[in-house]
Image: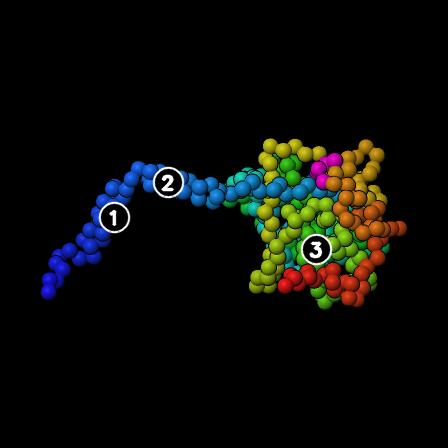
């Protein structure tokens, strides 16, 4: 019986196999090589990322302020359920966009915005000169911008949301809002004392006109980490865009249709359909969006109907 020469070893064996394989390739017909190249090209084309949809523009709302504070922690010591918000900003090809400014702002646990009077259910809250829950970050090399904040509360006529704006220099390329899971919001609002209110939240994601018009591109993903929640959202923008910003008046709130003298409607500003085309339930159009009670509030769902609206239906089959 012949034994292999131990001097060849593992390296020699691999080299021998490699030479054999290369010899096999060199004797393949030319048409076979071309076919293999075509197959590789087809696979590469299939692997190439398709164009991503732009993140939907929404109304700026009446409570935006440029507080000129670049900071990650926007809480200013405010109490609330800890929440980290992490954005990734990219173009439609998925390329990260560094050095863009991202602004974030939202209400506190009781639905009140800093910087404005007339806040809260009784419109008695005066927060002029305050800057809590507002701030800016510049995206890094990977297009990321992160904020440390608290879970937002709610106010009449709106579902739970966080506002954001992306600026390229002085030009806003995206003004939008993103929306948090209804079931999580419901739990916090009913079980955490800081968030509890005398009345039930009247508007859910499924009936909020702004959320319905914006669609899936503004639904944030939320996960639980140690002692905090983390909300993530990819913001897909055109860095050369110059969209019209829907900026409603600050006094008296705003109707979701944006039908104010001299102001464009959200549809005109963002290309979204008018409220009548969104499937909004009757009675929700014209409800106040400014952060306090008003003459036209949607009726809060109760009992089994509320549970059905809060929990996604089980997939058929």
Residue 271: image quadrant is top right
- For disc 1, the marked residue is 21
The location of residue 80, given as percent across then percent down, is 68, 59
Q: Residues within 10 Å of mark 2 (few under 14, many from 20)?
A: few
Left or right: where 270 falls relative to 6: right
Nearer-the-camera pick, 188 or 267: 267
Q: Secondary structure at mark 3?
A: loop
Q: Is residue 271 magenta?
A: yes
The magenta span reads: 268-272
Dividing the picture into quadrants, the one containing residue 276 is: top right
As drawn, the label of residue 152 is 3
Residues marked 3 and 2 touching at CB (< 8 Å): no
Please state which of residues 224 and 131 is positioned toward the viewer in this rendering.
Answer: 224
- Quarter of the rendering occupied by the N terminus: bottom left
Return the mark for residue 35.
Answer: 2
Q: CA distance from mark 3 to mark 2?
A: 57 Å
Residue 108 in the image: state x and y as whole percent. 72, 54
- The mark that comes first in sequence, 1 or 2, is 1
User: Vertical placement of 101 versus 83: above or below?
Assistant: above
């Amino acid at each position: 019986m012949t034994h292999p020469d131990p001097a060849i070893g593992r390296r020699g064996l691999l080299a021998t196999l490699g030479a054999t394989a290369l010899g096999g390739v060199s004797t393949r017909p030319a048409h076979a090589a071309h076919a293999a190249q075509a197959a590789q090209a087809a696979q590469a084309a299939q692997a190439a990322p398709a164009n991503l949809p732009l993140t939907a523009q929404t109304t700026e709302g009446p409570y935006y302020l440029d507080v000129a504070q670049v900071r990650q922690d926007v809480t200013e010591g405010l109490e609330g359920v800890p929440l980290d918000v992490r954005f990734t900003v990219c173009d439609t090809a998925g390329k990260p966009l560094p050095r863009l400014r991202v602004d974030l702002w939202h209400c506190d646990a009781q639905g009140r915005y800093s910087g404005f009077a007339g806040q809260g259910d009784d419109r008695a809250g005066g927060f002029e000169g305050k800057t809590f829950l507002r701030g800016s970050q510049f995206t890094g090399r990977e297009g990321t911008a992160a904020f440390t904040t608290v879970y937002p509360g709610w106010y009449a006529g709106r579902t739970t949301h966080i506002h954001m704006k992306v600026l390229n220099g002085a030009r806003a390329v995206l003004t939008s809002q993103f929306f948090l899971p209804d079931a999580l919001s419901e739990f916090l609002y009913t079980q955490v004392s800081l968030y509890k209110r005398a009345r039930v939240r009247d508007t859910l994601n499924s009936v909020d006109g702004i959320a319905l018009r914006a669609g899936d591109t503004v639904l944030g993903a939320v996960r639980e980490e140690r002692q905090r929640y983390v909300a993530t959202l990819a913001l897909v923008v055109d860095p050369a865009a110059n969209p019209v910003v829907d900026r409603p008046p600050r006094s008296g709130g705003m109707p979701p249709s944006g039908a104010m003298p001299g102001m464009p409607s959200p549809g005109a500003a963002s290309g979204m359909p008018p409220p009548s085309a969104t499937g909004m339930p009757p009675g929700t159009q014209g409800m106040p969006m400014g952060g306090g009670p008003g003459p036209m509030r949607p009726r809060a769902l109760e009992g089994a109907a509320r549970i059905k609206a809060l929990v996604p239906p089980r997939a058929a089959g």
